[in-house]
């Protein structure tokens, strides 16, 4: 911790192979200007790379901003002209009353480069990890923007010898005015997925669809992505927790509740945006933030157990609150149960108005599986 920032770090450091880190950097002085806050975050991150996490390289970064229209250009001006990793910038105001927070995912012993089509390749072992960030377009409405985003992404993957159904592990959709525009996202995703053999009889993709804004008000949907090239049959598994959750297609949407990927030395887990829902697709505990939080945790715990994991394996949490007035209550709950897990609380409407809170997370645990190569 510095005088102006607080840094949370999760470490997964096997004896051999790639180490993984999640770090979330918060500003602690709310009176600083945006430029001062952004510089404080970047300074803290650079110090990590030069010191405590020396040898690690960022493979994905996401900035959470309070006012993207007035901040994104300034932030981009502070970043290197040749970005070292995918850079996601979304207006989802940090709920600690600051203007900026950073989540960064880092690894050691990897080679990374930007590809000609805009995806970032992170290479180590037998797999190529393909990250994308901040994709957007200016089509007429949220449906058309989502359709074009997904169709363009399908083409990007094809250029790399990959397919959406076979290689994409995780997506994020940030939707301006989600109460109005999410229906278009759902319609486009459902229809594109059918063309890619992603159906209720095959599988979908772990995902978060959440309120969030681009700096340009004409951008209604922006998308981040993660895919892996080189996976073998049996490496990817999908999480259902049917005692707690129902298949998403039962209420008209198309994403997986969670996904885990096995490598020779580890299991990586990706939990989609999860809310207070039951296995009939109903909102549980309307208007009660405490009980919704507890039910949401119960759902995530059930998904993790299906992957033979626990909250102790979680490297980062992103918590979305519809009503910023709930922040103090929710932060107190999280700090009591997860005092050491890197987490960020942001103001973002969940895709159904009755949900007051949603969370997503990523995790990793040690594994020995001789059927697959090490990560």
Image (tube, helix red, strand yellow):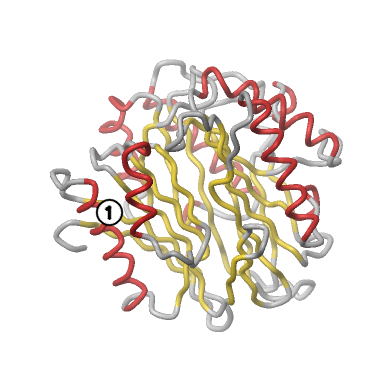
State the residue at coordinates (62%, 23%). Answer: 141
Crowding at mark 1 (Cα within 10 Å: few <14, some 14-19, many 20+): many
State the residue at coordinates (57%, 22%). Answer: 181
Residue 299 position (above or below residue 164): above
Secondary structure under the numbered disc 1 in the rendered image: helix
State the residue at coordinates (64%, 44%). Answer: 258
User: Does 287 sit left or right of 240 as displayed?
Assistant: left
Kindly identify which residue carries mark 1: 38
Image coords of residue 198 (percent x, y): 81, 39
In this orientation, which residue lies closer to the viewer: 232 or 308? 232
State the residue at coordinates (72%, 28%). Answer: 188
Query: In the rendered picture of this protein, how many numbered marks are placed on residues?
Result: 1
User: Residue 236 occupies which quadrant of the picture?
Assistant: bottom right
Residue 35 position (above or below residue 242): below
Image coords of residue 320 (percent x, y): 42, 35
In this orientation, which residue lies closer to the viewer: 320 or 189? 189
Image coords of residue 35 (percent x, y): 23, 51
User: Residue 371 occupies which quadrant of the picture?
Assistant: bottom right
Image coords of residue 90 (percent x, y): 44, 41
User: Does 338 sit left or right of 283 as displayed?
Assistant: left
In this orientation, which residue lies closer to the viewer: 199 or 141? 141
Residue 38 position (above or below residue 242): below
């Amino acid at each position: 911790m510095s005088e102006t920032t607080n840094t949370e770090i999760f470490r997964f450091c096997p004896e051999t192979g790639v180490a993984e880190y999640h770090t979330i950097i918060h500003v602690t002085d709310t009176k600083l200007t945006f430029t001062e806050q952004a510089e404080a975050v970047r300074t803290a991150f650079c110090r990590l790379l030069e010191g405590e996490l020396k040898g690690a390289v960022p493979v994905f970064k996401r900035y959470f901003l309070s006012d993207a229209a007035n901040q994104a250009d300034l932030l981009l001006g502070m970043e290197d002209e040749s970005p070292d990793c995918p850079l996601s910038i979304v207006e989802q105001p940090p709920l600690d009353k600051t203007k900026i927070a950073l989540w960064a995912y880092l690894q050691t012993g990897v080679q990374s480069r930007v590809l000609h089509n805009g995806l970032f390749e992170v290479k180590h072992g037998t797999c190529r990890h393909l990250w994308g960030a901040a994709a957007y377009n200016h089509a007429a409405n949220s449906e058309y923007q989502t359709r074009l985003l997904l169709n363009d992404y399908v083409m990007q993957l094809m250029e790399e010898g990959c397919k959406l159904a076979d290689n994409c592990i995780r997506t994020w959709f940030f939707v301006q005015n989600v109460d109005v525009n999410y229906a278009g996202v759902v319609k486009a995703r459902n229809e594109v997925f059918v063309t890619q053999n992603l159906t209720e009889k095959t599988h979908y993709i772990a995902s978060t669809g959440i309120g969030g804004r681009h700096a340009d008000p004409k951008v209604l949907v922006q998308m981040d992505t993660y895919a892996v090239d080189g996976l073998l049959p049996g490496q990817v598994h999908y999480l259902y927790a049917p005692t707690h959750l129902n298949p998403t297609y039962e209420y008209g949407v198309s994403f997986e509740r969670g996904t885990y990927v096995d490598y020779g030395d580890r299991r990586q887990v990706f939990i989609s945006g999860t809310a207070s829902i039951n296995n009939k697709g109903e909102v549980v505990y309307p208007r009660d933030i405490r009980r919704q939080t507890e039910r949401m945790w119960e759902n995530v715990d059930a998904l993790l157990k299906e992957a033979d994991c626990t909250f102790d394996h979680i490297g980062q949490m992103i918590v979305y609150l519809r009503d910023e007035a709930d922040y103090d209550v929710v932060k107190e709950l999280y700090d009591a149960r997860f005092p050491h897990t890197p987490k960020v609380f942001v103001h973002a409407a969940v895709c159904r108005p009755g949900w007051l809170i949603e969370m997503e997370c990523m995790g990793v645990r040690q594994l020995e599986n001789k059927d697959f190569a090490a990560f």
